[in-house]
Image (cartoon, rainbow, N blue to C red):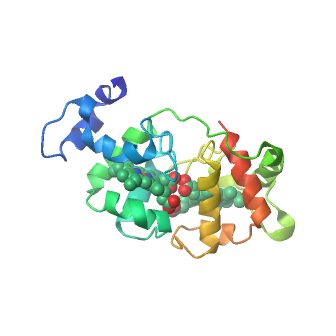
Amino acid sequence: MKRITSKPAVLAIIMACVASPLSAQESLPIRNCTWCHGSSAQGYTSAPRIAGQTHRYIENSLLSFKSHARDNPASKQYMWGAAANLSGETARGFAVYFSELPASPANDGDEALASEGKSIYVEGRPASNVVSCIVCHGPNAEGFEGIPRLGGMGHDYLKRRLEQWNEGYHAAAEPMPRIAKRLSANEIEALASYLSFVR
Ligand code: HEC
Ligand code: HEC
C-alpha cells in the first residue's frame, strides 16, 4: 500500500476521522469507499471509477450527495449514506486521495459506435443543437477542476447519467441537464461507447 503511505498529509486528514488507530494497510475509511468502487477504485458494478477523477469534481460530488442535490436512484441508495457524515475536510481528503490514483479505461462500449461517438464529442450536432463536449471536458476527455474526466469511464454508467438528466434527476448539475436533453438515445449510446475507450 505504498500509495497510501506516500501521502501522509491526506492520510492524516483521513485518519483523524476514525475513532480507533489503524495501520495504513487496514485503512478503514478508504475501504469504506473501495468495497463498492473496487479495490483500486476503477469502478465495480454500478459504482463508477473514481480513480484519476479531478479532485474538485469528486469533492463537489460528495457534497452534492450529502445535500441530496444529486438525487439519482443509485446515488440515493448508495451514496447518500456514504456521504452523510463527511465533513468538508474529509471530503477533500478523499477527493485528493482518489484523484491521484491511476485510472484504467473500461473499454466496455460498442466499438462499432466509437467513431460516431467521437464525432459528436468533438463537433456536436449543430443541426439538432447538440453542443460539442470537447470545449468543456477537454480534448482527451480528461476534465478540468469541477468538470469531470469522462475518458475511460464505464459505458453503462455514462449512459445512465446522460439518460437520467432527461428523466429529471440531478437537475442542479448545470449545464448538463439542458445539454443531455438534446441527445437522442442513439447519440447517448455512441458517446458512452466512444468515451469508454478514451485513455
Ligand atoms: C454502498 C456502495 C458505495 C459506497 C460504500 C461508496 N460508494 Fe460512491 N458511488 C456508489 C454508486 C453506486 C455510485 C453511482 C451513483 C449514481 O449512479 O448516481 C457512486 C458515486 C460516487 C461518486 C460520483 C462519481 C461520478 O463520476 O460522478 C463519487 C465521487 C463517489 N461515489 C465517491 C465515494 C467515496 C469517496 C466513498 C467513501 C467515502 C464512496 N463513494 C462510497 C457506490 C458506493
Ligand atoms: C459548458 C461545459 C460543458 C459541456 C459543453 C458539456 N459538459 Fe458534461 N459536464 C459539465 C460539468 C460542469 C459537469 C459536472 C456537473 C455536476 O455534477 O455538477 C459535467 C458532467 C458530465 C457527466 C457526468 C460524469 C460523471 O462522472 O458522472 C457526463 C456523463 C457528461 N458531463 C457528458 C457530457 C457530454 C456527452 C457532453 C457533450 C454532448 C458534455 N458533457 C458537454 C460541463 C459540460
* Rendered-image quadrant of the C terminus: top right
Residue 84 seen by the camera: yes
Left/right placement of residue 159 relative to residue 39 reads right
**Residue 9 percent coordinates (x, y):** 26, 35
Which residue is at 29% across, 38% downward? Answer: 10
Specify whether 183 is left or right of 101: right
In the figure, is residue 135 to the left or right of 58? Answer: right
> What x and y, as percent, mark residue 132?
74, 57
Residue 98 rendering spot, x and y as whole percentages: 41, 40
* Coordinates of residue 45 in the picture (x, y in percent): 52, 49
Quadrant in the rendering for residue 111 = top right
- Where the N terminus falls, by quadrant? top left
Tell me which residue sits at (42%, 67%) in the image: 76
Q: In this view, does 147 lie to the left or right of 116?
A: left
Q: In this view, does 141 lie above or below 185?
A: above
Q: Which residue is drawn at 13% across and 46% down?
A: 19
Residue 68's image quarter?
bottom left
Find the residue positioned furthest to the top: 2
Q: In this view, does 170 lie above or below 194?
A: below
- Which quadrant of the picture is home to ligand 1? bottom left
Q: Residue furthest bottom?
A: 168
Residue at the far right: name it. 127
Q: Measured along the vertical axis of the image, is residue 159 above or below residue 111?
A: below
